[in-house]
Image: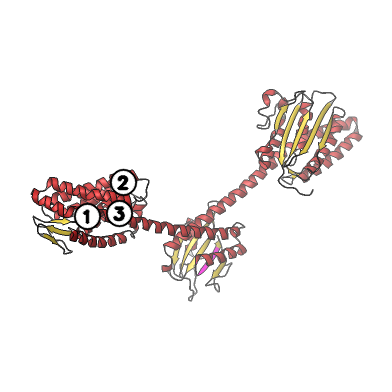
Amino acid sequence: MDNLTLLLIERMGILLTLGFMLTRIPLFRQLLDRELHVGTSVAFSMMFGLFGVAGTYAGVVVHEDGYVPSFWIFPLSGDEIVANSTLVGVVIGGLLGGPMVGMGAGIIAGLHLYDLGGFAALPMGLSVPLTGFLAGYVARFFSQERVISPSKALFIGMFAPVIQMSLLLIMSGPPDLVRTMVNVIGIPMVLTNSISIAIFTTMIRVALQEEERSAALEAERSFTIAQRILPQLKMGLNPQTAQAAALVLQREAKAIAVAVTDRERLLAHVGAGTDHHAPGEPIQSDLDRRAMASGCIEKGHGRELLGCRQKNCQLHAAILIPIKEGGSVAGLIKLYFRRPQQIGKVQEALAKGLGNLISNQLTISLAEQMKGLMKDAELRMLQAQIHPHFLFNTLNSIVTLIRIDPKLARHMTIQLGVFMRFNLKLTSSAQVTVGQELEHLHAYLEIIRIRFSEQFAVQTLVDPGVEDVLMPPGTLQPLIENCIHHGLRDMGAGGEIRLCVQRQPTAVHFTIEDNGRGFPEELLPLLGKIPMERKEGNGIGVHNVNQRLISLQGPDAQLHFANRPEGGALITFTIPIKQEVSA
């Protein structure tokens, strides 16, 4: 038995060499990635079934008087049996491909084993597909593992020959011969099959680690290249940015030459062929046009296909990578090589990763730019909604004063001009200083005092050191206007408005209060959140101010509304101190 075990271990080495070669087949890699359907299941069943047949031929013919060490196995006589490694391929097929693949491979290997004959032909032939099916079923309990661990495979591999020996004892005869053969081949088969299955799974895991390590290296390389050329490409495709990107690409991608184009012409070319591939020349090759139209990576070889008519050109192969921005192709990156054979899987993986990274980042950058433009447009729209309201009211007052006091109407018109010029200056920027905002408010109050005379008074208290803090323009004027037109509307005289600007360690706190009628209680939860156009609703202006504060300064800067216990309205908000500039 010891000699038989050693002989089976030697044959196992040949079998595992075949297994190592199997792990290098692309179809086998698909099985590891679980890309299974009817066609691939049949292909995998045949592959592992043939591996099982090879395991049979790696076995040893055993009879009552000893064993035959010859490598090739001929049809067996009535007292012979094969101590085999058939179950290795079948069990591996079941563990990787599931019950159907395991049983399919077992049927192929089992039929071959049955066809060899011998007194145990039937139980041996039946045990192989049964073992493959059971191995696939057991593998479902370890479905969270991409490949079952060697220790678990070793444990499962020990039971496979035991099932075979059990069927042999049940179904074969004569009993004395069967018991003798099981005693001779049982332990050697358990040892060699279980060890072979464990080693095979270890080889698969190593192959996967190599693949993952290679993919990780290429991904890291793609990230590095993309990180270095994105700053140039984000500034737009032009000869200067294309030249900088091409220099980085040639160094990192190990290409003989690199070219960058837009949709119409060559922007930059570095490396071999610079003497006749001049920037500015129009795109002529059909391969370039095909890559532009499809938006997919294209490969090509031959000077004519690449659009080069120079006979001595060293550029004989290329990978074309479309640069996408916002879903449309903006240009191409072309990696050139001396020979088509230099474009392997690594280069293709690099090109694919590079194309996806650059395109995604450019699309994100474009989306951020569009978001910024839309936000700015929205703020301009909100700003525009506030000033016509004040302008129309002031013009109506001027029309009235022209009839009753032309001198005062002239003075008010001059003040309106001053206010509007100052207003146009402020609205050209997304943010202004607190000092500028207070000047804007004072210009507004100068006009209001003419319109409302002795109806109210405005008191302003400002802490020192807040003048240079940034805030959205046109914030205070609509809030003071709200106090005048809504809070103090029913007061003939004695109205008071108080503005306090207080500096805190990290923010500036604004408080606006009046002694008017206050806010309707039912509207307090809604103020600033939705525009209201009813008489007592405090208008669109307050809503627009709140939205601009939130958009530019964040949710912590939103307006807070309340009623004073002694009567009147209270509005507060806080501007974080992010940056200070000179006025």
* Image-based side of 368 in relation to 392, left or right: left
Q: Is residue 311 above or below residue 345?
A: below
Q: Considering depth in this image, is 14 or 413 the residue closer to the camera?
A: 14
Q: Helix, strand, or loop for circle 2?
A: helix
Q: Considering depth in this image, is 152 or 336 the residue closer to the camera?
A: 152
* Image-based side of 116 in relation to 24, left or right: left
Q: Amino acid at mark 2?
A: Ala
Query: Which residues are the magenta region?
Result: 254-260
Residue 48, how many percent across, how many down?
A: 26, 54
Q: CA distance from mark 1 to mark 3?
A: 15 Å
Q: Check if residue 446 falls in the magenta segment.
A: no
Residue 179, how many percent across, how many down?
A: 12, 50
Q: Is residue 494 visible?
A: yes
Residue 198: numbered disc:
3
Q: Helix, strand, or loop for circle 3?
A: helix
Q: Amino acid at mark 3?
A: Ala
Closer to the chain start, of discs 3 and 2, is: 2
Q: Amino acid at mark 1?
A: Thr
Closer to the chain start, of discs 1 and 2, is: 1
Q: CA distance from mark 3 to mark 2?
A: 14 Å
Who's the residue at 14% across and 49% down the image? 122
Q: Is residue 31 above or below residue 240?
A: above
Q: Helix, strand, or loop for circle 1?
A: helix
Q: Considering depth in this image, is 371 or 250 the residue closer to the camera?
A: 250
The residue that disc 2 covers is 139
The residue that disc 1 covers is 86
The answer to whether mark 1 and mark 3 are in CB contact below 8 A is: no
Q: Residues within 10 Å of mark 3 (few under 14, many from 20)?
A: many
Instruction: Report the mark closest to the observer, 1 or 3.
Output: 3
Instruction: Report the mark closest to the observer, 3 or 2.
Output: 3
Q: Residues within 10 Å of mark 2 (few under 14, many from 20)?
A: many
Image-quadrant location for residue 58:
bottom left
